């Protein structure tokens, strides 16, 4: 019976020792140390970990900046005057082309600029008017989609950079283990946590960029739909009987 009690006490002491060791290790390793890759025991900073985190931080700043900048630009382009096309029709029926162009300039959105170009070509052939509208439309789409490719690229490359940082960190951990006669949890866990931080950061930045790209891409599609509708309605006005 005494042997059983001694065994239970030994197991309890070992469990308490492991728990206290993990608690002390967690307490020693700060979040900042994990971010910059500083070894909590030696104070050495991992250059590879630091460079990866700087690259991911730069990607996150660019992602936020581009999202805000493109959101404001696309949101401005998506504003549509409900009575725009009816007023254009009235001006065209009254043969007030200058007034119609002034209205387009005041409205100042991609659809209005396409219509303004079409009005300026009235008197030319139908194909010439259509070609001029399409050219303006292509230019406007290019402006709307400007820098969106960066967000799409960042959403794919950020996790890859994070995985690269993790791989380099694990190589550093295994290299340090090579010189150890006995490996303990406290020896390698800090390095492993540092390595995994780059994966977490990469995934966070990648998710941010992917969400930002999908949202802006959907907004651009809405604007393009409005542009197509305005151009079709304008061409229909030109083909109305009596015009």
Image (cartoon, rainbow, N blue to C red):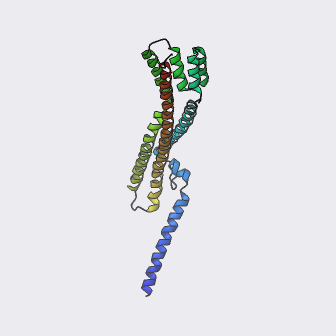
Pick the front one: 31 or 226: 226
Q: Quadrant of residue 67?
A: top right
Q: Residue at x 53, y 64 (%)?
A: 23
Pick the front one: 234 or 144: 234
> Quadrant location of the N terminus?
bottom left
Expressed as whole percent of the image width and height from the top left, the position of residue 83 reads: 59, 28
Q: Tag count in the figure?
A: 0
Pick the front one: 120 or 212: 120
Q: Is residue 154 above or below residue 37?
A: above
Q: Is residue 243 above or below residue 36?
A: above
On the question of residue 108 being in view, the answer is no
Expressed as whole percent of the image width and height from the top left, the position of residue 146 reads: 49, 30
Expressed as whole percent of the image width and height from the top left, the position of residue 103 reads: 60, 21
On the question of residue 19 being in view, the answer is yes
Q: Is residue 192 above or below residue 158?
A: below
Expressed as whole percent of the image width and height from the top left, the position of residue 220 reads: 50, 33
Q: Which residue extends farthest front?
A: 241
Q: Residue at x 39, y 52 (%)?
A: 175
Q: Which residue extends farthest bottom?
A: 1
- In the image, taking residue 134 as reference, residue 65 lies left or right, namely right
């Amino acid at each position: 019976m005494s042997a059983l009690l001694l065994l239970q006490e030994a197991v309890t002491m070992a469990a308490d020792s492991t728990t206290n060791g993990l608690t002390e290790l967690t307490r020693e390793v700060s979040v900042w140390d994990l971010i910059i890759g500083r070894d909590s025991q030696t104070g050495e900073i991992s250059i590879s970990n630091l460079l990866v985190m700087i690259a991911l931080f730069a990607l996150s700043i660019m992602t936020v900046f581009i999202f805000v900048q493109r959101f404001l630009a696309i949101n401005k382009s998506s504003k549509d005057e409900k009575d725009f096309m009816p007023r254009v029709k009235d001006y065209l029926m009254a043969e007030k082309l200058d007034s119609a162009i002034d209205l387009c300039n005041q409205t100042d959105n991609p659809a209005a600029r396409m219509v303004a170009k079409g009005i300026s070509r009235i008197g030319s052939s139908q194909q010439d008017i259509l070609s001029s509208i399409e050219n303006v439309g292509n230019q406007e789409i290019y402006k709307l989609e400007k820098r969106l490719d960066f967000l799409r690229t960042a959403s794919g490359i950020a996790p890859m950079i994070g995985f690269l940082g993790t791989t380099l960190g694990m190589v550093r951990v295994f290299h340090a283990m090579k010189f150890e006669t006995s490996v303990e949890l406290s020896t390698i866990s800090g390095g492993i946590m540092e390595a995994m931080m780059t994966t977490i950061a990469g995934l966070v930045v990648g998710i941010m960029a992917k969400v930002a790209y999908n949202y802006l891409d959907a907004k651009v599609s809405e604007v393009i739909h409005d542009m197509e509708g305005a151009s079709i309605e304008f061409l229909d006005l030109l083909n109305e009987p009596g015009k």
